Amino acid sequence: MTGETANAGAGAVPLTESRREQVGWYFYDWANSAFSTTVVTVFLGPYLTNIARAAADTNGFIYPLGIPVGFASFWPYMVSLSVFLQIFLLPIVGAIADYTNLKKQFLGVFAYIGAFAAMCLYFVQGSNYALGGTLFVVANLSFGASIVFYNAFLPEISSPERRDAVSSQGWALGYLGGGLLLVANLALFLNAERLGMDQGVAVRISLVSAGLWWAVFTIIPMVALRQRGVGRALPPGKRYLTVGFTQLRHTFSQARLFPQTLLFLAAYLLYNDGIQAVIALSSQFGAEELGMENSSLITLILIVQFMAFFGALIFGRLARWLGTKRALIISLLIWTLTIVLAYFVQNGTQFYILAVPIAMVLGGSQALSRSIFSQIIPPGQEAEYFSLYEVSERGTSWLAPLFFGLALQFTGSYRIAIISLIVFFAAGLLLLLRFDLRRAITEAGNTVPAKMR
């Protein structure tokens, strides 16, 4: 174990390159990826769409809170709502966490709220789409909040030179963990009748398993991660909520001093919106547009999970050879091309082929984005800045799913809805091309890695 200073800026905390702590940190990705894969990507979208279909009137509409919504658009709207709420919650809790230095405790609280809400999805059946939508919003909101504090540990447990590798290994382990649980759920789903249950019950059991997996494996990072530094005492007459708003105002005011960081964040919010929409809505596209069976979709997502494990590691190495920014640009060019090709997909076989490039760039683009961002934020404010970052993180974007849902509702075409997402990749890529990584690291008061390309 070797010790060094994370950076020279005010608020810096001791950085300890501990393999034990890094592995413990990886395991939160292993824990929460079961929710991302089993719930968000595979099972809940088609299942909740069927629940909404059962509750729809003869015109295909349901009426949550009296608002007419096409039943097919209910799921993307719920994805959008869950992230829209994060815009208000995450920056506040991130500011409080940095002020109190309770990142580890916040990580645990939100992880277990999300896991419990996921387990309660077992009770969603019949035409009770409102219960399913509410539980999903709570679970996804908690998922996003927990990731804020998880990501905020990255600058504390890895040096700038190791940041790409550590971030990529975390993503890779997450895909492996999510894939392994999906294997078990796939076996259950495909053998449901043989086991004396219908497929709806198998789906509900799978949703519960994701919550249990999330809860059990969260114990590992809670034991392994260290709490560094000390929090600040509340000023007289102040409460944590008001301090959170005050700290947040300070963050937004200070952020103007880091124009390159803001430029990268703007690029990330755009292209990651597109990535998250593809993750969350691909099963619905396959089921409704291509007529693929649930078993075929689950098998496809399972293949993507295991290929993404290798993709994340490959892009970690590619970043070392070409530089992090260049490797990220390559991944976004591949994303853009696959969205164009998706418009022309006619059957399940073509959908399978298209999944290959997506799997290779899925983990890499996200791991490298996280690594870059961890190097261009001021020390001591990791949770605050990662809360802004997380607003558009894995499976939790709101603008692109809303765009997709509106395009679907007004045109009735899943193809037009999917091609509309190209706007987010193209705009994010254009901003990324203008981004200067070396300058951003210096502006934030951090040390430029010695071997940076």
Image (spheres, rainbow, N blue to C red):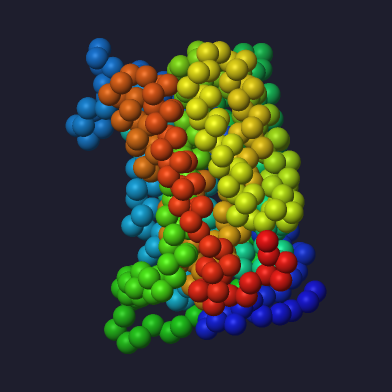
Rendering coords of residue 153 (x, y %): 60, 66
Q: Residue at x 34, y 50 (%)?
A: 85
Quadrant of the rendering where the N terminus is positioned? bottom right
Asked if residue 263 is positioned above or below residue 380 in the image, the reply reads above
Q: Nearer the viewer, residue 379 or 41?
A: 379
Residue 57, quarter of the rendered image: top left
For this orientation, the residue located farthest to the right is: 1
Q: Residue at x 55, y 81 (%)?
A: 9
Q: Residue at x 62, y 75 (%)?
A: 447
Rendering coords of residue 315 (x, y %): 69, 47
Quadrant of the rendering where the C terminus is positioned? bottom right
Q: Residue at x 25, y 12 (%)?
A: 58
Q: Nearer the viewer, residue 81 or 365?
A: 365
Q: Nearer the viewer, residue 132 or 175?
A: 175
Asked if residue 216 is positioned above or below residue 349 in the image, the reply reads below
For this orientation, the residue located farthest to the bottom is: 236
